[in-house]
Amino acid sequence: MKKILTLVLVSALGGMLTLGAYKLFLEPEQNVVVATNQTTPTFLPTSTASSLYNVEDKANFVLAAENTVNAVVHVKNVSISKGQMTLQDLFLGRNPQYKQLGTGSGVIINADGYIITNNHVIKNAHELSVTLNNNKTFEAELIGADPKTDIALLKIDAVEDLPFVTFADSDQAKIGEWVLAVGNPFNLTSTVTAGIISAKSRDLSGNSSQSFIQTDAAVNPGNSGGALVNTNGELVGINTAISSQTGSFIGYSFAVPSNIARKVVEDIMEYGNVQNGILGIKGGPLNSRFSEELGVDDTEGIYIDSVVEDSGADLAGLKKGDIIKEIDQIKISKFSDLTGHLSAKRPNDVVQLVISRNGNLENIPVTLLKNQTYTLPLVGEVKNAKPKDLKKFKVSNGVKIISLDTNYAEYWKNNGVEAGNIITAINDVKVNSVEDVQNILKNKSQSGYLRIELINSKGEKERYNFR
């Protein structure tokens, strides 16, 4: 029995050894494959172009500066100010005065010696002189000025042709475009600084009456009236203002766009004053809150709240509720976009509007007209009177009051004056139009009286004197 068990164990052990030898030496090798899940990486569009400028593509500041610096001049303004009157001055009948010197910059715009600058540079000037980059000094004549746009035009008589800067189309200037500011900050003549256009149609007044180009090129006191040029040395704007709490540059400066400046000086040269083309609408820019209040889907554009009677907008068929989206293919997002473009237009110019009406876009041409309304201080808004208005009050001339100044409305009502009455004369000068009113007030001294002659609701002639 023991022999049988021994034989079985030996046989089993032999079988195990035989199987192990087979597995180790004779069985074919099998590869083990481990499967894994691979995630495809997210594709990010990447440009393979070199991010470095070619030498030919770099902005050439040197060329732009050379084309500009000799055409930018130093403007000196000598004004006369009244001094503090003493008892001795009063006794001797003297009127103490002293001279005050102001400086700024200007840009020669043609070879004949016409120079554009800011109105605030030459304001109240008693003497004006201009010094060129070659140190030659000339007396300057003030041809005209427009306080609204802060642009003035000077003229010097030079024997030789002068270097000048050509105008660029400021509507084509782009945000991010390189520009140079050239002027005379702190009496440091022929100073050039560089920056980019950081915004357009910037309104600093808050009443949508301005439209500046904003740049981060350094501009300081003395740069006013100087040139803002592109990399071709072409005039993009007239440097006018800075945003600062210290009086010096802290990051942003502002220029009157060249299209507006050019139009103003052309008007001054041709007409002697600025010709404004009026659209004739009242309204405001849309945003999410206003759009929700008005119940409209658009959140960009100018919502027309009212249309001035007999204006270009009225004659073209614009209506309350229309939304101006474009003017002459320029997108309108805020009111200064609209007013900035219109500032470069004249009466009888035609502008192409794209409006949204009831959700549908329409193209409407509008002929701009002369200003038919004007805000008369202390009284309110007036407009040209129609023949039927004059006939109603049995007068041959006058302008019509269309709304009273809210601060003085109670005073006028207590005196029987209301909207619809006719003003026949101002400061003893008969008025036939809004332009007459503007011209009278333009020539009125700051301390002078304002005398209003009008026909009230009862048909009675009244005269009012205001300091």
Image (cartoon, rainbow, N blue to C red):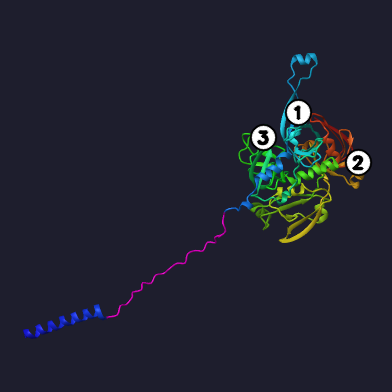
Q: Is residue 329 visible?
A: yes
Residue 185's disc is 3
Point out residue 43 in the picture as x, y percentages from the top left corner: 51, 64
Kindly indicate the quadrant of the structure image that contains residue 121: top right
- Whether tag 3 and tag 1 are in contact, CB under 8 A, the answer is no
Quarter of the N terminus within the rendering: bottom left
Viewer-proximal residue among 82 and 157: 157
Kindly indicate the quadrant of the structure image that contains residue 440: top right
Residue 68, above or below 81: below
Label 3 SS: helix
Quarter of the C terminus within the rendering: top right
Residue furthest left in the image: 2
Viewer-proximal residue among 148 and 379: 148
Would residue 37 be counted in the magenta stretch? yes
- Of labels 3 and 1, earlier in sequence is 1
- At label 1, the amino acid type is Val
In magenta, the rendered stretch is 27-51
Q: What whole-number distance in Å separates the C-alpha atoms at marks 1 and 2?
A: 42 Å
- Of labels 1 and 2, earlier in sequence is 1
Residue at the spot of label 2: 397
Viewer-proximal residue among 354 and 434: 354
Q: What whole-number distance in Å separates the C-alpha atoms at marks 3 and 1?
A: 18 Å
Residue at the spot of label 1: 78
Kindly indicate the quadrant of the structure image that contains residue 430: top right
Label 1 SS: strand
Residue positioned 72% across, 50% down in the render: 171
- At label 3, the amino acid type is Pro
Q: As drawn, is 12 to the left or to the right of 301?
A: left
Point out residue 426 in the picture as x, y percentages from the top left corner: 86, 35
